[in-house]
Image (tube, helix red, strand yellow):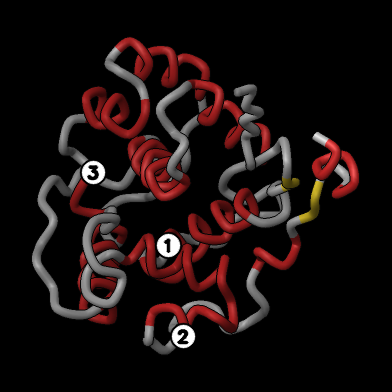
Amino acid sequence: MDILIFDMDGFLVDVSKSYRKTIQRTIQIYLESCLGFKKRGRRGWITNEEISLFKTAGGFNNDWDLTSGLLLYLLSISGIPPLPKRKRFSSIPEVVSYIKTTSSRIRQKTTTRLKRKDLPFFLRKSKSKGGGLRGVRRILGASWEGWVYGVGDPGRENLLKRIFQEIYLGRIFARRYHLRPIFYKGDGLYLQERALIPRKILLTL
């Protein structure tokens, strides 16, 4: 039997205005609304090209992992001091209150300023350590883990996934997770996805 196997993102479906925009918005909300970083200009915190660099480095098929990796990298060059240990919380508002208050105290003593990015060099090092989020963690150690809550239940501790899913799913988030949205209440960016291959061709194949 002959079998055709297609990749989804970027091959069958254009996700440049859905998943990639969701990654960018998640990073923006996480850094600005949750950590209290000063708002960036029109260029934003991360570009589509930089997301593509992470994608092509290997090991980042999971977009939640990719967003965590980007956040850890940005924090490592932001000037904010390391915070190696995550605490345990029972709700997302508790997580936000903790990291915002902790960040505020630190920023009173030091200036947070993004250093020049060198993603190609960083990703080469990450790849040499196994690639993906594991590679990023092996380079940075546990230094900034305490700032990034990207593990567990999005109703309790997984702040990154909570923001990401609210943006991507939009108005169907509440139905999917049985949780009220906190960070985003517009239409889900999944609605921006478009097929790249006509349905006729797929049916023929």
Q: Which residue type does callout 2 highlight?
A: Ala
* Element at label 3: loop
- What residue sits right under mark 1 in the picture? 30
Q: Is residue 125 left or right of residue 181?
A: left
**How many neighbours does mark 1 have within 10 angstroms: few (below 14), some (14-19), or many (20 or more)?**
many
In this orientation, does residue 116 appear? yes
- What residue sits right under mark 2 in the picture? 174
Give the farthest residue toward the front: 1
Residue placed most toward the observer, 126 or 161: 161
Q: Quadrant of the N terminus?
A: top right
* Element at label 2: helix
State if disc 2 and disc 3 touch (CB < 8 Å).
no
The mark found on residue 50 in the picture is: none
Q: Which residue type does callout 1 highlight?
A: Tyr
> Residue at image x 26%, y 58%?
149
Q: Which residue type does callout 3 highlight?
A: Trp
- What residue sits right under mark 3 in the picture? 144
- Picture coordinates of residue 130, whole percent (x, y): 29, 17
> Residue at image x 66%, y 64%?
190
Q: Quadrant of the C terminus?
A: top right
